[in-house]
Structure formats: structure tokens, C-alpha cells
Image (cartoon, rainbow, N blue to C red):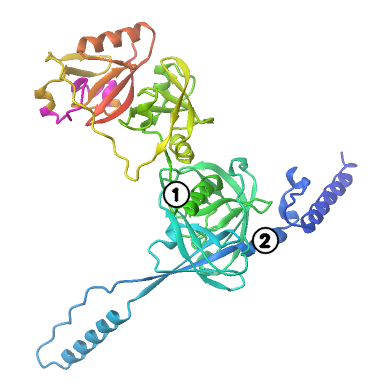
Amino acid sequence: MGASRPATWRRTLALCAMAGMLVAAGFGVVPPVLAQGVPPPLAGFADLVLAVGPAVVNISTTKAQGRSEDLPVPQFPPGSPFEEFFKDFFERDQQQQRQQPRRTFSLGSGFVIDPQGYVVTNNHVIAEADEIKVIFNDESEYRATVVGRDTKTDLALLKIERDAPFPYVEWADSDTIRVGDWMLAIGNPFGLGSTVTSGIVSARGRNINAGPYDDFFQVDAAINRGNSGGPSFTLDGKVFGVNTAIFSPSGGNVGIGFAIPSNLARSVIQSLKDTGRVARGWLGVRIQTVDEAIAESLGLESTAGALIAGVTPGGPAANSDIQAGDIILRFDGKKIEKMRDLPRIVAETPVGRKAEVELFRRGERKTVQIVLGELPEDETLAELGQPEPPPNGAPAQIAELGVSVRELNDELRGQYQIPPGGKGLVIVEVDPAGPAAAENLRPGDLIVEVNQEEVATPADLAARVAKLKQEGKKSALLLVDRQGDLRFVALRFPEG
């Protein structure tokens, strides 16, 4: 063992020397030894920075601040020497504000993706700016115009002009990025100018509640204020992420930064470049998470997928075979691991495409096709038609669920302010110690279905529950309507 150590070190040093020579030989080639796991800092990032650094820019914006309301002149006794002094001072100050509005300045980062001068940055970097300047490492400045912006992903596309082509970088395929991969970030932290930091990809698929399509990379390279809009690079010099946010109790770097994946950013930026706006695919459904209780109720082996709680009338799904209660497992060939995967994948799918949807319905898998529409700017659910109210009936207690229910009538509709489209059994009482209370059900909620079968009378509900218990089920899956908001709720039966 001891005799082999010098030979091992010699081989390691030889590999490191080879890595350095390959990197020095030219940008764009990833040394094979790096692919085998030798850490790139042994060779350094200098050649990578020389190759991509010229395409990374600083973004400087200015915004005119409207003057504040005129402050009242302090009141002094008539004839006081301070009266005229403060009157002159306040009047002169307010006149200057009216003539020269105060201006605020903001700094961020960006990168050029096209030799014609298209620059990517974050929308919040240039939001409400009156003037935008793009500054390169050689201190050349260009006034930028906004091609388009997207608030839902916090991305913006700028355009600058000159006769000669601009240096630029290319997008990477972010789907190939792995946790633990080395990365490089370049930006303009705190307005200091171009700054390089390195680290690794710490996690994928982070949801930080920044928007409806959150799917961030988490990186540990030092990212601070001013880095927003800057690129995260792979070792072959391609952009795999747009640095957007940090987690920091102090406001400074603590090793937790977030970047928008390039595959998401690229489609948004291309749409902004082509049309100045973002056209997103639209399925026309409302969805919810598949938890363990719901999966058990439906006979699913895992909690993967997105449960369809409702279908928007007039939307694309309404014109297909997709139904409320279906669980979408794959969309357009992409697996739905979590509920929030579906909106992002649908949004990234081109409008008008005929997509295959693999779903789970009543114990079976099936595939349907749907032609995607375009997501409306302000998507709203159409009001459902009004059914005939079921006949009046006496309340019934369903002990296994911990509720008492009645058939819907005009009196109950008015008492609980149930919308015209509501149908089902009205919960009139909830046992505080029962399963319904544990899932926050309350009087006025409507039970529409039990395990995807409609119920119209208390007897229907009692029979469905009894059948489930006879089959050895541990819970009942209810479709509940609360003021027009449909959702599935799994209620576990009490033990014993």
C-alpha cells in the first residue's frame, strides 16, 4: 500500500498537468480528465473567463422620482426672524425640486446572446427605468431599448446597437446539469464592476414562491446584490442559468443563490425576441397535489402526478377527453413528478401543438390528445350553468366522515350563500374530532363526488362510504365544492 502512493501521486499530477494544457489550448474543449471528476480549480478558470467575460455586461438604470408633496412651512410668531428665513428656504427648495426632479440609480448584470446586440437580464433590474445603459468590461457604454419583458419569470430582453458585432455567449441545455457540477458566475455585485465567482450546483427544482413557474437551480457561488440578471456558466462556457435571487438574512452572500434554468429562459427570450411578448401554452384545468391519502384512495403506487380538480368551460381540456378526477402522469413526453411541474411544462409547450397526455382514471392508465390553447393574460374560470336543485330532504349523519349532510335546496343555498352553479350534498355540521374537521371542511361545503362517483342524496353518500369500508379502503376521496372552488379531499376513516 505504502509503495504505491508515490506512483499514484505521479499519475494524479500528470493528469492535472494534462488538464492545464488542454484548457490552455483553447476555449470550447472540456478536458476528459475533468469529465472524470478531477476538480477544475486545479487548472483554474482563467481561460474560461477570458473567453466568456467580454459578453457579460453591467446594467445601469436611472429613474426620475416625482417630487414629494410640498412640505408646510413651520409656523413662527408673526415678525419672528425665523419666519422669513424658513419661508425663503422652503420655497427655494420646492422650486428646485419642480425644476430638477430627483433621480434614482440601479445596477444589475446581463449578458449578450446574439452578435446583433440582444442582452438578457432580469425584469426587476430594468423595471420602471427611464434610461438603461449597457456597460462592457472595456468601459464602452450603449443606450439600450426594451424589446420585451416577462414578469412571471422575471426576464427581460434589451437591444443595443453598433456597426461591429458584439461578443456573445450561447445557451446550455439545463436538463443535463447535475447537482454537484462545477459552475462559474460573472456579474456586477454592489456596482463594483465585473466580478467572477465559482462554486457548484447545490440543488435543482427549487420553489422560492417567486412566480408560477418556479424551477430554480440553487448554486453556492458568491452571488450578491447587483448580480441579478448575470449568467451562470458551465465549464464549456455556456449559460445554464440566469442569476435572479439570493437567500440572505443579512442581505449579503451566504452561499445560497438561485438561477433560472436556461431551457426555461431560452424559450421566454426567444418569444420576446420574435414578438415582444410571451405566448404560453394553456390546458384549461385547475389542479391540486396528489398526497398519500389521495393516492391510496385511488389505488396509485406513488404521489407523482397532478390531480385535475376542475376543467375550465370553453378551455382546451374541455374539448378533449380530460375529466375532473384524472391524474396527469406525463405531458408531451415529460413526467410530472410534482403538481407544480405541470403548469411549467404546459407553459413551455408551443401554442397549437397536439400533445399526448398520459393519465390515470379509475384504476387504469390511458393516453389522450389535446391541442393547446394560449394562456389568457388574466385567466378566469367561467361560471358553471345552474342545475335544477335536488328535492328537499332530512339531514343525515355520516359518522365515518364526521359530518352531517342535507340535500341542497333554496333555503340552504341562501343560508350558506352557495353560488347558482353549486350542486351536491350540503355539510350542515362537522364533528370537531372527526376526519372532516382534520381536513378543514366546514358547514356550507358541498360534497359532489365520493371516489369519482356523484352523490345526490344522503343515502347515496352512506352507501358509497359503506362500500369503501367493505372493500378494505382506509379513506374516502371526496370532491368538495367551496363557493365554486372545487378540490379533492381524502378523509381517513377512524380506526376501530
- In screen coordinates, is 186 left or right of 226? right
Residue 236, position as x, y percentages in the image: 69, 51
Circle 1: element type: loop
The residue lying furthest to the top in this view is 470
Residue 24, position as x, y percentages in the image: 78, 58
Q: Residue at x 72, y 58 (%)?
A: 44
Residue 433, position as x, y percentages in the image: 25, 22
Q: Is residue 250 visible?
A: no
How far apart are labels 2 and 1 at the CA level? 27 Å
Location of mark 1 (residue): 153
Q: Quadrant of residue 32?
A: top right
Circle 2: element type: helix
Q: Earlier in the sequence, mark 2 or mark 1?
A: 2
- The relative height of residue 222 versus residue 289 in the rendered view (above or below) is below
**Region in magenta:** 414-437
Tell me the number on the disc at residue 49.
2
Q: Nearer the viewer, residue 24 or 323?
A: 323
Residue 421 located within the stretch drawn in magenta: yes
Residue 153 located within the stretch drawn in magenta: no
- The relative height of residue 89 versus residue 185 in the rendered view (above or below) is below
